[in-house]
């Protein structure tokens, strides 16, 4: 239309008063080709994904693996961060600090029963109990082993039933194994033999060195709410929450209850502008990671199930990488807008010049290929992201 209509209307004397010289088909065909080259959307189409690829690369340099550009884009909207406790806010490396035996059991016998029960478990608590026991476990005596999520383990050894876990394990299957109230700071593992309470073991866990600094930085970056969910007992959770000044915490939760809590938190935000991120590491965290807007797994100590379910993986188990990820996400978004604005501005200018016959073919090529190159170069700036 641009190549035919203007000269046609000129020769029909419709547009002749608007031009000072004769308008030829050759001239308008040239203008049309210039206009066509400039209007090619390649630079615009290229400028957006290249910026996100750069953002994903910048995050990976800092030990953060985004599994998709959509997760990188959503990360900048994080309003609420929900943390698991064990292995996330804490090191996940336990140490036995106390053993309390009851009903005629000795501390050594209690520790032996706990080690026998935990012999087949990969949980950090199990490893700590086995390390404290320090002797070899007769695994050949174990006839059956059952791991009960958010409860503990049930083992049949030499025909006798051993239960080891939190308080819930003592009330499993309508059982009600009586025991003294245990109020102590730390993680408690109760042990029972043939429905008879043997005592409990107290373990301590260390808060991550960068946890407090990370939470403070997240608040400074605009995160409005920090929540902790854990299956651990209330006293241990309260101690960690108090130390890190966490806004709110919920303890003694089953995996499905964690999902319900996340759903409740989602009701308090506008999903179009705000997102909820969950940070966890264990097998039990996999359903919550999938249910959250952004699931973040600890890649070092984290289980394979958690890493598989997550949208983002912290490869070095460095909590402060969350702040780096937030910086990269926001920086990437800003560069995307810069690229879009630059493409529209330059192309709009050259489209106008091309229509007026003031742009050459070489200038048209610059307005297309040159702008695409500029967008790529601008996108590399995200690789140098440090902070905002």
Image: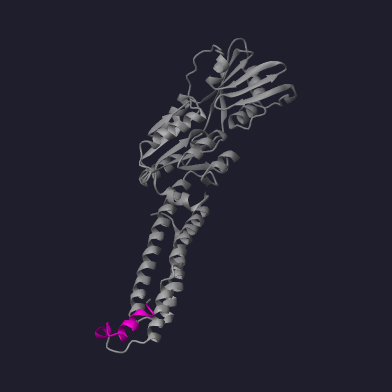
The answer to which of 98 and 222 lies nearer the viewer is 222
Find the residue positioned furthest to the top. Answer: 104
Expressed as whole percent of the image width and height from the top left, the position of residue 358 reads 34, 82
For image coordinates 65% across by 20% down, the residue present is: 113
The answer to which of 365 and 166 lies nearer the viewer is 365
Expressed as whole percent of the image width and height from the top left, the position of residue 149 reads 57, 27
Q: Does 352 lie within the magenta span?
A: no
Find the residue positioned furthest to the right. Answer: 140
Image position of 108 with respect to 240: above or below? above
For image coordinates 58% across by 29% down, the residue present is: 125
Q: Does 15 lie within the magenta span?
A: yes
In which image quadrant can residue 194 be found?
A: top right
The answer to which of 378 and 61 lies nearer the viewer is 378
- Can residue 228 be seen here? The reply is yes
For image coordinates 40% across by 78% down, the residue present is: 32
The answer to which of 145 and 174 lies nearer the viewer is 174
In which image quadrant can residue 308 be found?
A: top right
Expressed as whole percent of the image width and height from the top left, the position of residue 25 reads 38, 85
- Can residue 170 be seen here? The reply is no
Q: Quadrant of the N terminus?
A: bottom left
Q: Quadrant of the C terminus?
A: bottom left
Image position of 70 with respect to 308: above or below? below
Q: Which residues are magenta?
A: 2-18
Find the residue positioned furthest to the bottom. Answer: 21
């Amino acid at each position: 239309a641009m190549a035919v209509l203007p000269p046609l209307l000129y020769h029909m004397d419709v547009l002749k008063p608007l031009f000072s010289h004769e308008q030829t088909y050759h001239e308008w065909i040239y203008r049309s080709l210039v206009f066509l080259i400039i209007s090619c959307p390649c630079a615009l189409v290229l400028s957006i994904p290249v910026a996100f690829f750069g953002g994903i690369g910048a995050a990976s340099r800092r030990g953060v693996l985004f599994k998709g550009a959509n997760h990188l884009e959503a990360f900048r909207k994080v309003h609420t961060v929900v943390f698991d406790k064990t292995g996330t806010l804490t090191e996940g490396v336990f140490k036995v600090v106390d053993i309390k035996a009851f009903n005629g059991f000795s501390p050594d016998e209690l520790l032996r029963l706990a080690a026998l029960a935990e012999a087949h478990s990969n949980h950090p608590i199990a490893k700590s109990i086995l390390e404290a026991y320090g002797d070899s476990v007769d695994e050949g005596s174990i006839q059956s082993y059952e791991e009960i999520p958010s409860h503990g383990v049930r083992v049949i050894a030499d025909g006798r039933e051993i239960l080891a876990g939190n308080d819930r394990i003592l009330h499993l299957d309508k059982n009600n194994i009586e025991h003294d109230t245990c109020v102590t700071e730390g993680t408690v593992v109760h042990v029972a033999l043939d429905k008879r309470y043997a005592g409990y073991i107290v373990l301590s866990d260390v808060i991550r060195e960068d946890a407090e600094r990370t939470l403070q930085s997240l608040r400074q970056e605009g995160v409005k709410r920090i929540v902790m969910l854990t299956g651990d007992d209330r006293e241990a959770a309260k101690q960690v929450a108090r130390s890190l000044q966490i806004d709110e915490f919920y303890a003694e939760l089953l995996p499905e209850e964690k999902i319900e809590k996340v759903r409740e938190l989602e009701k308090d935000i506008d999903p179009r502008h705000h997102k909820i991120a969950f940070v966890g590491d264990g097998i039990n965290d996999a359903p919550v990671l999938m249910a959250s807007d952004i699931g973040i797994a600890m890649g070092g100590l984290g289980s394979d199930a958690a890493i598989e379910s997550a949208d983002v993986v912290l490869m070095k188990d460095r909590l402060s990488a969350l702040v780096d990820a937030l910086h990269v996400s926001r920086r990437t978004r800003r560069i995307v807008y810069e690229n879009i604005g630059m493409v529209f501005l330059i192309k709009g200018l050259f489209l106008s010049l091309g229509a007026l016959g003031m742009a050459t073919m070489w200038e048209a090529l610059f307005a297309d290929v040159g702008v695409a190159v500029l967008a790529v170069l601008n996108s590399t700036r995200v690789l140098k992201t440090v902070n905002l």
